[in-house]
Image: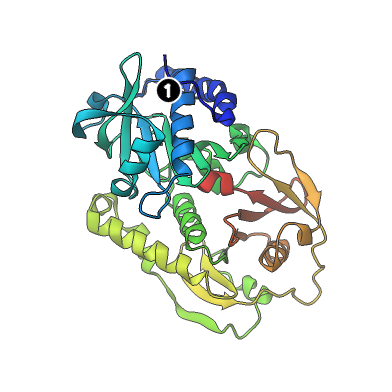
Amino acid sequence: MFNNSTYQAAKIVAPTIVNLFADHLDRAKERGEENLATVPDTKIIESIIDAAFWASLRREEGNSPKISLAFLPPDLAGHPLLFEKRIKVSPASLTKLAPGVERAGIHLGVWHDGSELYVWGTTHKIPNYCFVLDVSEPGLLVIKHRRVTGYGKFVNVAVLIGDQVKIVDEDSAHLPDCPEVLSSLLGFTSAGDDSVNILIQLAVSMRAHKHGGTLLVVPSGSSNWRQSILQPMKYSVLPAFCGLSDLIKQDNTKRVNSFWQSELIREIESIAGLTAVDGATIISDQHELLGFGGKIIRPRGKDMVEQIVVTEPIVGGGAVIINPANSGGTRHISAAQFVHDQRDSLALVASQDGHFTVFTWSPCENMVHAHRIDSLLV
């Protein structure tokens, strides 16, 4: 029916992806949900992945393509932009289209006529559980779907990095002590949970600036965290800056306003940008900015953290217990120490190479738990 793929990972992952999307849609139908997508068959998924992978290795005017492909017919796309003539899905055609559709929220609509896959146009609107394939970097593809509520980051299903295939393990959300930020990234926490979704957007923005950084989230109304930060803090903020927290407190009638959404993005990017400064950025769990450039120290009388448990929410990514020094660089070691000493806090750490870790205290394991979540953020 479609061209045989030459990208071996496409053949390996396609059957699993079909089963995952079919399962999601079956459960959604049982719950009575509407506006649901159609599940592509194995050969269609394999062909889309194959074309996208080879397109990712090409260049157009010196730039690598960044595109998002959504599998749906035009009649499920709201008010789409329709091409007069449909375009065959191929590495060459996708590369040519890429410069015009690389901005966030724009999807190339892909459908078939029974013998050929084609691009019919572009859309901002897609149905629930629609198969989406993002070309993020050369050789890096992300399979995802839209949240049912339509709010927040898309839910990642699988990540393909060259010949490496990572299938997201949704069961990770049901493990003891799973933090809400991880549950939300896996699609199980309500997308309307502002606190969790703000942390996700901060994490995405931190990862995007590629400088690396640490964000500490501490309990509001408590000053215990200051024992773990060298005083005086060079860039302490007093009074706490409430630009982000004030936006979150506004009622739902204002949130549909494009101005509110633009302001939210600006505040998130501002705080995430501060994490590029050497040292840690500190915010409260009410999203108040308390300072940045903080040097994490071990309080007098506290033990040095000697081991942590590390997990990654992918199939086959079992837990391992290691010394914090083996989890990453100085940022990771200091973040683990901070959470070890301030157990009601959490730490988000972005590496320059794109790796991202959330450190939390695990009462079940009685140690710091490092959640590697970069597979969920791309």
| Total tally of numbered discs in the picture | 1
Residue 112 falls in image quadrant: top left
Q: Which residue is mark 1?
A: 28
Q: Position of residue 183 (x, y in %)?
A: 55, 41
Element type where label 1 sits in the image: helix
Residue at image coords 54%, 28%: 6
Residue 353 falls in image quadrant: bottom right
Residue at image coords 68%, 52%: 370
Neighbour tally class for label 1: few under 14, some 14-19, many 20 plus, Cα within 10 Å: some
Up/down of 310 relative to 264, above or below: above
Q: Position of residue 156 (x, y in %)?
A: 50, 38
Q: Position of residue 199 (x, y in %)?
A: 49, 55
> In the drawing, does residue 62 fall left or right of residue 366?
left
Q: Position of residue 252 (x, y in %)?
A: 28, 50
Residue 259 falls in image quadrant: bottom left
Identified by mark 1, the residue type is Ala
> In the drawing, does residue 69 fall left or right of residue 303?
left
Of residue 200 and residue 145, the one placed in the foreground of this image is 145
Q: Quadrant of the N terminus?
A: top left
Residue 190 seen in render: no
Of residue 122 and residue 309, the one placed in the foreground of this image is 122
